[in-house]
Image: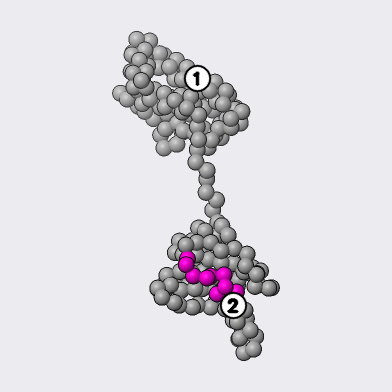
């Protein structure tokens, strides 16, 4: 269960079907027979609850050694969660109700594209070093605004640097390569307009040296 895998403090867990006590899943590093204990005590707990008319079963807590087994009904099953003896079962139970946030996959960028992104960031830094980096970031954003709708959401300025927000699709690699070349040309053209060809050329050369 994804929700259990993301809750810190759970040493191991077992899930059993409420209707027949059959084991669905056992995970974690516990050396205890969690599935057997969960199946046995959930069934016993239900029987005791019904015989004594105790109302709805919230959870059962068993302690042994340095650990604790918390058994509770969850949807159409029983969960057996092994935690440290001193941990509060209620705290773990409350975490079960929290939404599971899917982890974003790591951003993977082909080398030729990451090299171009690095070059663009160096150009922005070099051109704006003595004037105003914010001005060159504005120009960078201006160049990004002309990108196609299928490219623009994937790349952008993040914390003052051009970066891929997610992995570019393989079939769009050529499109991204052309877009990044356009951005380089746009920035160099703006540098020539604002500081003259000689100074712009010197700063471009400085970037080339840094990339070697």
For image coordinates 42% across by 27% down, the residue present is 118
For this orientation, the residue located farthest to the left is 130
For this orientation, the residue located farthest to the bottom is 52
Q: Position of residue 204 (x, y in %)?
A: 37, 16
Q: Residues within 10 Å of mark 2 (few under 14, many from 20)?
A: few
Please say if 149 is above or below 181: below
Question: Taking 43 as reference, is 180 left or right?
Answer: left
Where the N terminus falls, by quadrant? bottom right
Mark 2 or mark 1, which is nearer to you? 2
Residue 113 in sight: yes
Q: Position of residue 33 (x, y in %)?
A: 52, 70
Task: Please give the residue where the numbered disc 2 appears in the rendered image.
Answer: 40
Span colored in magenta: 30-40
Instruction: Give me the disc on residue 132.
Output: none
- Check contact, mark 2 vs mark 1: CB within 8 A: no
Q: Residues within 10 Å of mark 1 (few under 14, many from 20)?
A: some
Q: Position of residue 68 (x, y in %)?
A: 46, 74
Q: Nearer the viewer, residue 25 or 184?
A: 25
Question: Taking 145 as reference, is 43 left or right?
Answer: right
Q: Secondary structure at mark 1?
A: helix
Task: Please give the residue where the numbered disc 1 appears in the rendered image.
Answer: 181
């Amino acid at each position: 269960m994804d929700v259990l895998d993301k809750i810190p403090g759970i040493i191991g867990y077992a899930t059993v079907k409420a209707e027949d006590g059959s084991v669905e899943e056992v995970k974690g590093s516990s050396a205890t027979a969690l599935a057997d204990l969960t199946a046995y005590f959930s069934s016993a707990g239900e029987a005791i609850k019904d015989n004594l008319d105790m109302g709805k079963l919230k959870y059962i807590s068993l302690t042994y050694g340095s650990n604790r087994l918390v058994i509770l009904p969850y949807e159409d099953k029983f969960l057996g969660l092994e935690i440290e003896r001193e941990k509060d079962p209620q705290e773990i139970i409350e975490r079960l109700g929290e939404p599971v946030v899917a982890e974003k996959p790591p951003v993977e960028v082909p080398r030729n594209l990451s090299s171009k992104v690095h070059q663009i960031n160096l150009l922005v830094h070099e051109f704006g070093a003595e004037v105003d980096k914010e001005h060159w970031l504005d120009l960078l954003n201006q160049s990004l605004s002309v990108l196609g709708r299928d490219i623009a959401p994937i790349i952008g300025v993040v914390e003052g640097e051009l970066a891929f927000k997610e992995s570019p699709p393989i079939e769009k690699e050529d499109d991204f390569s052309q877009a990044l070349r356009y951005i380089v040309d746009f920035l160099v053209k703006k540098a020539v307009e604002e500081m003259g060809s000689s100074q712009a050329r010197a700063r471009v050369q400085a970037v080339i040296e840094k990339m070697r």
